[in-house]
Image: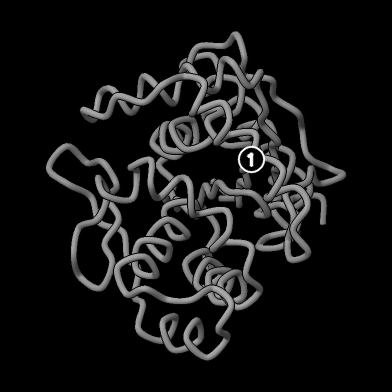
Amino acid sequence: MKKIILAIDGYSACGKSSTAKAVAAELNYTYIDTGAMYRAVTLYFHEHHVSLTNDKEVEKALNNIDITFHNNAEKETETFLNGLNVEDEIRKMYISEKVSHVSSLAAVREAMVAQQRKLGKKSGIVMDGRDIGTVVFPEAELKVFMFADVYVRAGRRQKELMEKGQLVDLSDIIQNLEKRDKIDSTREVSPLRQAKDAIELDSSFLTLEEQVDHIVRLALGKILEEKKETISA
C-alpha cells in the first residue's frame, strides 16, 4: 500500500501530539514530534545560558545539539538531547514559557526544519507542529489543521501537568497559551498558519479516539486516492 506524508499543524494543547502519535500507530507510520525538538533546543539554551540576541552564541549552540527519538519499553516515543532522555524535563512549565521565543529565531527554525526534512525523507510519517504543512512539507499528501477553545486547551494542559506532578493555576496556563499563540502566529519566520489545502479539525469537544478516527479515515481516503492516481497514470 502506498504511504503518504501526513502533516498536522495547530495551536498548543489542542491535542496535536497525542492524536498524531495514535494516528501513526494506527497506520503503522513513523511519528515525529517537532514540538519536542524545539523544546529540547529551549532546554539546551536554558542550561547553557545562551543569549537569544547573540547570533554567534545561538549558532554555536545549535552546532552542539543532537536530537533523536527512541521508543521506551511501552513503545512510547521519548526525546533525547545529546544522548540524554529529556522527555519529562522538556514538558515542564518553565520550558513552555520560553519555547515560543526560542522557536521564533530564524537560525533555530532553519536548523530544525533541516533535521525534520531529513527525518521525513521517506513517506509513511506523521509529523505535527506549527509549520509542517506550510514550510517543512508543503507537498504533504494530507494536511490537517487543529484548533480548540482556549479554556478547553488550558484544562487539558493542566491535567497533563498534574499527571506529571506539577500544580499550575489554570489562569497562568491560559495566559501562557494566549502568549504563545500570539508569538507563534506573528513571528516573521514560519508563522503558525493554516495551509490553504489543510482540512480543519476543531477538537474542543472531541475525544482523543474521535480525533484519531477522523484523521485515520482521512488518511485512508487519501491513500486510496493516491493509489488510483498511480494506477491511472
Q: Position of residue 212 (x, y in %)?
A: 51, 24
Closer to us: 120 or 16 = 16
Task: Residue at 52% x, 21% y: name it.
Answer: 171
Instruction: State the residue at coordinates (38%, 47%).
Output: 94
Residue 73 placement, left or right of 121: left
Q: Residues within 10 Å of mark 1 (few under 14, many from 20)?
A: few
User: Which residue is more in the foreground, 21 or 176?
Assistant: 176
Residue 223 in view here:
no
**Amino acid of disc 1:** Lys
Residue at figure coordinates x 28%, y 66% from the top left:
81
Q: In the drawing, does residue 205 fall left or right of residue 212? A: right
- Looking at the rendered image, the quarter that the C terminus falls into is bottom right
Q: Position of residue 145 (x, y in %)?
A: 70, 36
Percent across and percent down for residue 104 are 64, 62
What residue would you read off at disc 1? Answer: 179
Residue 27 higher or lower than 94, as above or below: above
Q: Looking at this view, name the residue that lies furthest to the right.
A: 196
In the image, is 224 to the left or to the right of 165? right
For image coordinates 59% across by 16% down, the residue present is 151
Estimate the x, y position of residue 114 in percent, counting from the top left.
56, 75
